Each structure stands twice: as C-alpha cells, then as structure tokens.
Amino acid sequence: MWMAGGGVKGGFNHGATDDYEAVENKVHVHDLHATMLHLLGLDHERLTYRYTGRDFRLTDVHGNVVKEVLA
C-alpha cells in the first residue's frame, strides 16, 4: 500500500515481503484503519456505534496506531 502526505514519513518502507506474503513488520487491517483514522485526527477507540445493544468499532478491539510510519 502506498501512503503520502498528511503526517506520513516520506520515502519510508515499512515491512518486507517474499514472493507470496508479508514476512517482516506485518500490519493487520485493524492497525491500518487505526493509523488512517489517527492521521485524520480521530481517536479510533472513541469512534463507536451501537448496534443490537452492543458497541462496535471499525478497529474492533485489535487496532493499534503504527507509529513507525508517522512523521
């Protein structure tokens, strides 16, 4: 994935892959969403909605901001 601007480090590679999969510094989709929401100025842990009596978050309970890609 390519990210640019808005507080992302320029010219920075995070992780590595072989021919088929990520092998170093893997980032889960919940971490990616948490990082993107952080760059937009939103706290992913406070962004909740209630559905059928339960609170849900886009990042569920797993998301962590990937600080290595932040400028």
Image (cartoon, rainbow, N blue to C red):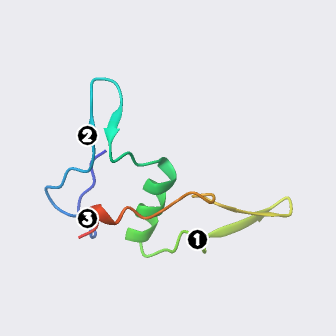
| Left or right position of 1 against 9 | right
Would you name the residue on which mark 1 appears?
45
Q: Are marks 3 and 2 in contact (CB under 8 Å)?
A: no
Which percent across, then down, holds residue 16? 26, 40
Q: Dot 1 lies on which element?
A: loop
Q: Is residue 47 above or below residue 24?
A: below
Which percent across, then down, holds residue 38? 42, 70
Q: Residue furthest right?
A: 53
Q: Which mark is residue 16?
A: 2
Task: Give the distance between the C-alpha atoms of the residues marked 1 and 2, in whole angstroms.
Answer: 28 Å
Task: Give the distance between the C-alpha atoms of the residues marked 3 and 2, in whole angstroms.
Answer: 18 Å
The quadrant holding residue 50 is bottom right
Q: Residues within 10 Å of mark 1 (few under 14, many from 20)?
A: some
Work out which quarter of the rendered image holds the C terminus and state it: bottom left
Task: Give the distance between the C-alpha atoms of the residues marked 3 and 1, in whole angstroms.
Answer: 21 Å
Looking at the image, is mark 3 or mark 2 earlier in the sequence? 3
Amino acid type for the residue under numbered disc 3: Val
The residue positioned 58% from the left and 71% from the top of the image is 45
| Left or right position of 11 against 29 | left
Relative to the observer, which residue lies in front, 22 or 45? 22
Which percent across, then down, holds residue 34? 47, 62
Would you name the residue on which mark 3 appears?
8
Work out which quarter of the rendered image holds the N terminus and state it: top left
Amino acid type for the residue under numbered disc 1: Glu
Amino acid type for the residue under numbered disc 2: Ala
Looking at the image, is mark 1 or mark 2 earlier in the sequence? 2
Relative to the observer, which residue lies in front, 65 or 5? 65
Q: Dot 2 lies on which element?
A: strand
For marks 1 and 2, give the one nearer the viewer.
Answer: 2
Which percent across, then down, holds residue 57? 64, 62
Q: Dot 3 lies on which element?
A: loop
The residue positioned 85% from the left and 58% from the top of the image is 52
